[in-house]
Amino acid sequence: MNRYPIFYLGRLVPFMAAIKSGSFIGASAFLRLEPSAISKSVRKLEEELGIPLLKRDGRSIEPTEAGLLIYSIGEGILLLADDIARIAEQHSEE
């Protein structure tokens, strides 16, 4: 595994939505994507990081310990991404 794994912000959002809602179906309703798209995105993120982020049992999911840590860090990442977008919007007229 790379020392600094690179993953797309777009994969972090479905992962976090799945944890927050407790299911891929709930995340799909929130993000307006198919549940299979959410599941595939999370699996790809797990492959890129080289660790399981979710425990899957039928239709229910539960975060692993690593999944909870990444979720917590992800909240900060998304807040920073919002800050970047806000700065860009404020300075778009320069």
Image (cartoon, rainbow, N blue to C red):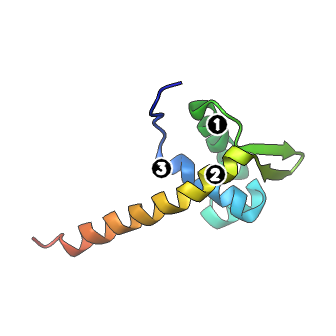
Disc 1 designates what residue? 46
How far is disc 1 from disc 2 in space, using C-alphas? 14 Å
Taking the spot 40% from the left edge, 61% from the top edge, the residue there is 81
Residue 73's spot in the image, x, y percent? 54, 55
Q: Quadrant of the C terminus?
A: bottom left
User: Would residue 13 be found to the left or right of residue 2 on screen?
Assistant: right
Local secondary structure at mark 2:
helix
The residue nearer to you, when weighing 51 against 39, is 51
Q: Quadrant of the N terminus?
A: top right
As drawn, 7 above or below 93: above
Taking the spot 50% from the left edge, 50% from the top edge, the residue there is 10
User: Would residue 18 be found to the left or right of residue 56 on screen?
Assistant: left
As drawn, 81 above or below 36: below
Taking the spot 65% from the left edge, 43% from the top edge, the residue there is 42
Mark 1 or 2: the one toward you: 2
**Which residue lies most toward the right here?**
58
Taking the spot 13% from the left edge, 73% from the top edge, the residue there is 93
User: Would residue 91 be found to the left or right of residue 52 on screen?
Assistant: left
Mark 3 or 2: the one toward you: 2
Disc 2 designates what residue? 69
Crowd rating for badge 2 (residues with CA inside 10 Å; few <14, some 14–19, many 20+): few
How far is disc 3 from disc 2 in space, using C-alphas? 16 Å
Residue 27 image-quadrant placement: bottom right
Disc 3 designates what residue? 9
| Residues at discs 3 and 2 in contact (Cβ within 8 Å) | no
Local secondary structure at mark 3:
helix
How far is disc 1 from disc 3 in space, using C-alphas? 13 Å
